[in-house]
Structure formats: C-alpha cells, structure tokens
Amino acid sequence: MSKHHVTTTINGDPVEYLCEVEQTLLDVLRDDLLMTGSKEGCASGDCGACSVTIDGRLVCSCLVLGVEAEGRRIETIEGMAKGDALHPLQQKFLDHAALQCGVCTPGFLVAAKSLLERNPNPTETEARYWLAGNLCRCTGYDKIIRAVLDAAAEMRRS
Amino acid sequence: MAEATTAPAKRKLKWVGKRAPRPDGVDKVTGRAKFGADLFMSGQLVGKVLRSTLPHARIKSIDISKALALPGVKAIVTRDDFQDMASEFVPAGEMMINYKDVVRNIMAREKVLYEGHPVAAVAATNAAVARQALKLIKVEYEVLPHVIDVDEAMKPGAPLLHEDMITQGVEPAPTKPSNVAKRVQFAVGDIEAGFKKADVIVEREYHTQPVHQGYIEPHACIASVSEDGQADLWVTTQGHYVVRAHCARLLGWDISKLRVTASEIGGGFGGKTVVYLEPVALALAKKAQRPVKMVMTREEVFRASGPAPGAWVKVKIGATKDGRITAAEATMAYQAGAFQGSPVQMGCMCAFAPYDLENVKTVGFDVVTNRPKVAAYRAPGAPISEYAVECALDELADQLKIDPLDLRLKNAAKEGTRAVYGPKFGPIGMVETLEAAKNHAHYTAKLGPNQGRGVASGFWFNIGGETCASINVNEDGTVSLIIGTPDIGGSRASHAQMTAESLGIDLSKVRTIIADTSMLGYTFLTGGSRATFAGGMAANQAAGDVIKQLCSRAAKIWEIPEDAVAYEDGFVKPAGANAGKFPALSIADIAKKAGKTGGPIVGHAQINAQGAGPSLGTHIVDVEVDKETGRVSVLRYTVIQDAGKAVHPSYVEGQFQGGAVQGIGWALSEEYIYGADGRMQNAGFLDYRMPVASDVPMIDTVIVEVPNPRHPYGVRGIGETPIVPPMAAIANAIGHALGTRLYELPMSPPKVLKAIGQNEAKGQGRGH
Ligand code: FES
Ligand code: FES
C-alpha cells in the first residue's frame, strides 16, 4: 500500500497530498484535507451532495479518484465566496430560504454555478433538469429553483 | 414565572411573521457548517458494523479472534458487550420503544431478525483495516424461515420472530404466540346503527409499501471516552438529550458522565429520533480508549435504519344522499419490522380525525416481520390510514355526485368536535383550509386530456413536551438564546424572532445557540412538530424572566419600588407616580451596570409545554397520465394548511413544499422491494427513487392562520401534516384522469398500465 503523490490546485491554491489509489477525491477532500463542505450522501453518484468541478466540469467527487486530480483545477464550495462577499447564488439561497437542513446545499450551489457558467439564462425546466442529479429531501425544490433563476437574473444584470 | 406578554398575537408584531435572516444560513451556504460526519478528533479510529446478510437466523457462535489479531484493530464489540435489558417501554419521539428490543436492535443477541441487523462492530486505525477485520469475524448461523409480507406474517403457522410474543389487547389473551404484537381499537357511537342509516356505502381495501425518510445525511457520530469514564458524543440527531438517555441506559452509565452535542443535522423526518450507531460507538471508544467515528453508508441507511411501515387498510364509510356521513370504520395492519412498535395506534387515532362523526370505529394490528424496525416518519402512522380514508371519501363523493370539498365541508371537524380518541378540539382550521381550497384558482382551472384533479385533507395532533431555554443578557445588552432542540430546518431563526419580539429588541441583537446536554436541562427532541411551538413558549417565558430582572435592576438603580417601573420595547421606564422622573434605561444600560446591581442577568424557563394545537391541511393536485407508459406527471400542486401563526413564513412554506414532494414520492415511486430471499433489492438512491427537481412542479402554498390560543404567538406545529394528504390527493387525481381507481401505493407505471388495461377491457375509459 504505497501512497501516490498528487499535485493539484484547489480553489486557486496549490495543494499537494498523498493518497491511496482507491481513495476517492471526496475522501481526500474530507478526510485528508479536512475540507468537509462537500458532503457524502451516497458515495454512488446518485445524490450530488459531493459536487465539485474539475477543470470547470461538474462531477460527483465520490466517483473521481484522488489520483485523478493530478495537474487539474478543483473548485469546491469552500471557494465559492470571495472574501466576505457571498456568491450571488449563495445570497439568493439565503434570501429564498432554499435550504432547510442545508446538507444538500453545497452540492446544489456548486452544480447551479456550473449551470449558470454554461447557460446564464436557463428556463425553469432547464434548471430542473440540470439539477436533477442533486437530491434534496427537505425543500421539494421549489425555493431552490426560484433562488437559482433569481441569481441568474441578477448575474445577468450585473 | 411571568409571561413576557399574554396575548402578543393581538398586538402589532415586529419580528414574528417576518422572513428574517437565518442565523445558521451563511455557514450552510459556505460549507462551514459541521454535520455528523464533519468532526475529527485527535487519534480517532474508524468504526464499522458487521451486518447480517440473512433475514432470519439463530446465532450459534461469533468468533472474533482472527479479526482481533489483525494489526490496526483496536476493539471489537458483540452482543457480549451489552447487558440484556428488561422489557420497558419509553417514548421515542411520537412512538414508543422497548429497551429489551433496542438492545437487540443495536446488536443482535439470540437471532438476527432482518438483513442488515448488526452482529458485531470493529474499531480500527482506518477504514480498510476495519473492513478487512469484518471479513475475519466468523458467525455461525442456524438459518430460519423468514416472513416479509404483513399478511403472511399474520397467518397461523407463519415463521415466528419472537417465540414469546402474545398479542396484547385481545380478550381473552391468546394462548399461542404470533407475529401480531398488539391490537388497538378506538370507537364512539354505534357503527352498525350508523351504517343502517346510510344511503350509500363505500367499502375498499388499500395497500402501501414501506418508504424511507430519505434524509440526505446518513447516520453519523463520533464518540470519545476518557480513562475516568467521562464521555463525549457528537452526533447527528433530532434529540441529543434522548440519545444521551438511551445510551446511558444501554451502557449502564450515569447520565452525568455522558455529554452529547448535536451536530448540524442533514434531515431526519423522524428517522433520527432513535439510536443505532451511538451506543456502539461509545462501547468501542471505551474499549479502545480512543475516539471512534462511525458513519453509515447509504446502503446501511436503507437496510438497517427505520423506514415507515407498509400496511393494509380496509375502510368502510356510509352516508346519506345529502352527504352526511352516518358511520365510518377502518381496520388496518402495519408492519413494525423486526420489533413491535409500528405507529398503528396513531394511524387509528388520525384516520377520521378531520371529521365530525357520530359513529366511528378503528381497529389496528401491530405486526412484526423480518424487516428493519420502523421509525417515525413525519406524522408517523397518519399518512397511511388517512390515505385510505381520503380515497374512500373521494369515491363516496363521486357516487353521491357531490363536490369532494363540499362533502368534506359537510362533515368537517370544528372547535368542540370530539375526536375518536377522546379530547374535544379547540379552534382548528379544517373548514378554513377547505374553503381556501374551494376559492383557490387552482380548483377551477381547466384540465386537458388524460389529466385529472384530486383533493385530500390531512390531520396531525402536534405535541409539546419538556423544553428548556435560557437567555443570557450579555454585558453590552445583546442576548444569547440557549435552546435544546436541534435545528433541522430554520428553528433557530424562529426562536430568535420570538425572543426579539418578547423582549422588544432588534432581531440582530439575538443569537440562538443549540446547547449540548450539559448546558441546559432535559429537552425533548425536535419532532412531533414541537420545536418552534414548545421552544417558542419556553423562550417567551425566559424572556419574561429577563424582563422581571431588568425591571428590578432599574428600580434598584433609581431607588424606587420594583412595581413602579414598566417595560416597553427594550426599555425600562419609571411608571405610575414616578413616570417621567428618570430617563428610560435600555437593556444595554442595565446590562452595563449588572455587576453593581446583583450580577449577570439570565432568564430561564423549564416547562412541559402543553396546549399543542392540531394542524389541518388540504391539498389540490393535477396529474397527467401517459397512457402508453403509465407514467404519472404532477402538473400543478397547491398546499393549504393552518399554521396557527407562521413565525417565519418562508420556512413554513418550505415545510409544506417538502412534505408534499415526499408525499409525491410515496404516492408514485418509492418502495422497499424484497426478493424471495428476504433481502432488499433496491438499497440505493438509483433504485429507491425519490423525486428529483425535474419530477415536480413548483408547489404553491397558502398559509391559513387560525391562532392556537394556548401559545403566546398562536403557533401550531406545521412540519408533519404536509405529508398526510398527498398520496390520496394524487390517487384521487389519477382516478379522475383514468376513470378507474388504483388501491395500492406506489402508483408506479406498471400498476397504472395494468389499471388502464383493465379499464379498457371494461370499456370504461373517459377523459377526466
Ligand atoms: S455522495 Fe457523491 S453523489 Fe452522493
Ligand atoms: S435542505 Fe435538507 S436535503 Fe436539501
């Protein structure tokens, strides 16, 4: 069981770590780097609570191996606010009460940010299908979708 | 103790009713908030559970020697590490548990009773070693025949889960054991006579499948026990005081030795009111003398933590031509899982609770089967029996050619109606929600082909219970509210709002903290829709205590009698003969001088909150049925419910919406599927299909407010009722879309297709 050395970038910072081959990126983030903002709801790619982006692509970090981060750019929920300014999506989630327990929230925010980078003006249906990989058991999705559409509108204005 | 104010509901409210910012909000959108699996301790071990792959077997022996010898393994526990417990029922949330069963559920003793039943647990230096150790534990079983289905389990000659189980509630007591733990009955009036008076009688049988609460955060905890026996537990739970009580009891420890801290909780819905990993983690931590972290996998959550029961319900309702119900009867059997204690009693109590009926009888059976022990799930028991009743009522309305809302209005329970389970209702909002439904634009909107509309109502009691609150007035006049109910969906915000209102201060001056079990007296769990109700009551009383102290301190400063001052909007003013003699003192002014006037100012309340008011709701739903695939799409959904008073309307709406969508899953896609081998076949989110964003429309809400006179702000609980009406509303909508009805949940495409096929064979198809 010799560990692999990985050099990567997380939220803009250079990071190095050692990991086992079988460790997922989610395991590395949570257990080794103590970045627990990404959550594990299923470990099988079905809930989206572990969503991160790799080189701008939205992935479930529970389905990516830690070694695959070598030389890539990882973005997690911890990198979403800039200084003391929340990202418009974060602010709109608060304004719209788009979270109840909040455990799905990091995943939804990362996924929604990725949506708006591709499609700054999604329809309700487009938002619903893009976010269909993220499970929320508390909200019934109504306020989440409203928050995403409202954030998109605000980001288009600014 | 002084109430801050007796009838604030009547005065102009500044904070209660506002969509205020949520104290824990920023932490939850930035990933900072710490949930059950997010805490790390120095030297922590990983705990893993060996679970039975058999649904029913006698344990002949457990050999842990090889596993224990594996380098990196620090402790192993089995049944031998837990004392057997005598039979004793204690409340767990809104349900009852028996310690004799709990000790067997956390770790199998004589037998394994379901696939997933824990048999041993290992603490090791990392997950890989722990998993390897589990493989080295040798368990010898004598395989026994199993029974999964509730009807099969009730038959004579069915495999017995508990050889000593004699059905309770039957006279004379049966002489032979069975899988029927209990029979319960509630009755008023004379149903025989009532049915004789009926012009129309509808009699139907309904079936439901177990569904999981589906919280996104799996069960997780980390336990640490020091050499002197002092223990700490960090856990995701709806009630850390309840966890403390159960763990101390199961481990034979003094309660004072164990401090439990509630992490942020990633959903519970009733499922996080019982213990699974917690006593095991503590036992491992004590043995290993190192912290032990345990987290369930999603598969373990499905196989071994409580779903809601599956059931059958037979309903018979009779009415006169003009729609007055003359008699109503329901008989139901609920699966309890491996140990007795399904919520069938609540099913019986709630079945006809929204209605004012003269002759009612409900009978329930609590039946054990080789499945995981059920746990509370939002309004435990009620969604099943009320689903059956609300479907039968809809058929009755069709037969009588009466509008289904009018039929309900004609029979609606009101203030003064006596419930089948005894008490008379205070003011309740059944009529108001029905009228709001009738007047809602949704109810008369046009429908297209293959579309149908359904309505259904729902009832839940709500509870109060033991609750503590403290308000610390800080040196600068800001306040910390300390409360003991974990915040599962915004309750910190509503508690802060009620505190700011009671003290008459700005909301930004209040910070709500959830206490650990050592900081505050016993506080019952977040469940039964009690947190905002009971916590608000306690916070209001604690605020009253603070106000009394502020007044007395001000009087001291002014050197006038205590009763010569008055408190208003965060200021103490001289009153009566002294009015205007001194400038008013703010809380900050008084707090600054607290050291000189008697020390810190702290308000307390410790109450057993009484007077919870039932919450009633009515839902309207439109569906479209794809006749080719059998898929049902929910097109439009409206939830109307009585909140008493919505302290934070956004989170009230959120509860309505979340409950409705869980109900949509229960109605259309969620179910436990078992193979002939007694093993669950869909223990993952891919195959256990909960609604995703693209499955549902926006969920419209109407908050009705019929204030609860027994709460300072008129609050009722609101969290549970929303899951009661959806299944029947959707079934009724499908019935209207197809012109034929389904009697079994979930109404998944194969079942819908079958119903369409049968319908077309009969040549009865119609639009809507
Ligand atoms: S934890 Fe990765 S998708 Fe659920
Ligand atoms: S807010 Fe709880 S799962 Fe989404």
Image: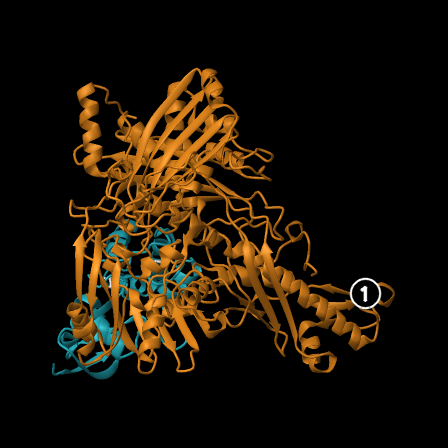
Chain colours: A cyan, B orange
Please identify the quadrant where the C terminus of chain A is shown.
bottom left
Q: Say which of B253 and B580 sits in front.
A: B253
Q: Amino acid at mark 1?
A: Asp
Q: Quadrant of residue B5?
A: bottom right
Q: How many marks?
A: 1
Residue at disc 1, secondary structure: helix
Name the residue rendered at 15%, 44% in the picture.
B676
Q: Say which of B212 and B561 sits in front.
A: B212
Q: Chain of mark 1?
A: B
Query: Does the numbered disc 1 mark a residue whose Cβ is under 8 Å from ligand 2?
Result: no
Where in the image, quadrant-wise, is ligand 2 located?
Answer: bottom left
| Image position, residue B157 (x, y; %) | 24, 37
Is B758 on the left-hand or right-hand side of B272? left
Is A14 on the left-hand or right-hand side of B375? left
The vertical placement of B524 against B461, above or below, is: below
Please identify the quadrant where the N terminus of chain A is shown.
bottom left
Name the residue rendered at 46%, 33% in the picture.
B352
Label 1 Cα crowd, 10 Å radius (few <14 / some 14-19 / many 20+)? few
Is residue B733 visible to the viewer in this orientation of the structure?
no
Is B335 on the left-hand or right-hand side of B126? right
Name the residue rendered at 38%, 71% in the picture.
B34
Label 1, on which residue? B563
Q: Say which of B492 and B1 sits in front.
A: B1
The vertical placement of B741 against A82, above or below, is: above
| Image position, residue A28 (x, y; %) | 22, 76
| Image position, residue B629 (x, y; %) | 17, 36
